Amino acid sequence: MIPILIVFAVFFLLINSLSIRDNENQPKNLSKIELIPDTIQVNGDLLSFQGRMNGQKYQVYDTLKSLKEKGFYQNLSQNCQLSFTGNLEIPETQRNFNGFDDQKYLTSQNIYRQITIQQITNVEIKKNFDLHTLRRKVIVWTQNHFPKPMSDYMTGLLFGFLSKDFNQMSDIYSSLGIIHLFALSGMQVNFLLIGFVKYFFAWD
């Protein structure tokens, strides 16, 4: 029993030290970001997504300037690299007792900085294909072919994607006793996608 506890203690100490190292090794500024397509969220004129650059992940926010730009991100299902001007900041901590701790939540996803974009100067579409683009393509197809709230049910249950519209109706889902189904589906979606890709390439 004691050796097992020692192994767990060493493991958690290692994870904690890696987290501290990543937090300390953050850049002071950034001008490019590789967008992760299946994290795109559009809520009115607000755009949010997660991105990567130089081995680090970031939470990114932008204010959409036009309906054309909004439509572009709502239907974007490819990897792309954005060049931008903006602010690189430490996420906010919990402000009050019942408030949401954004910093703690993002840290749990290995994200230690957030970006607020002022202006996007270039969008470079990438042709590479991965699980993120596959998941995003299916999410966009579902949103474009099914009415709300059915599309929210489907993307939540089948692909683990909870849109901003879903978050606004979460109290209704809770009262119906089905909110737990969406939490379970989020755990299962990666296994389904990996299984699909393995089957596809094995068949090919």
Image (spheres, grey):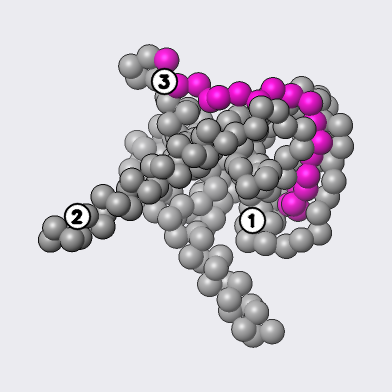
Camera-nearest residue between 149 and 19 = 19
Label 3 environment density (alpha carbons within 10 Å; few <14, some 14–19, many ≥20): few
User: Is there a contact, CB below 8 Å, between mark 2 and mark 1?
Assistant: no
Figure check: 122 above or below 6: above
Q: Which residues fall within the magenta stretch?
A: 74-95
In the picture of the structure, the residue carrying the numbered disc 2 is 5
In the picture of the structure, the residue carrying the numbered disc 3 is 94
Quadrant (top left/top right/bottom left/bottom right) for the C terminus: bottom right
Residue 74 can be seen, yes or no? no
Inter-mark Cα distance, 2 to 1: 36 Å
Q: Mark 2 is on which residue type?
A: Leu
In this view, the residue farthest toward the bottom is: 203
Q: Is residue 67 magenta?
A: no
Residue 196 can be seen, yes or no? yes
Camera-nearest residue between 60 and 4 = 4
Point out the frontmost of discs 2 and 1. Answer: 2
- Sequence-wise, the earlier of marks 2 and 1 is 2
Q: Mark 1 is on which residue type?
A: His
- Sequence-wise, the earlier of marks 1 and 3 is 3
Which residue is rendered at x = 56% and y = 65% of the image?
193
x and y, in percent, of residue 160 in the image: 51, 51
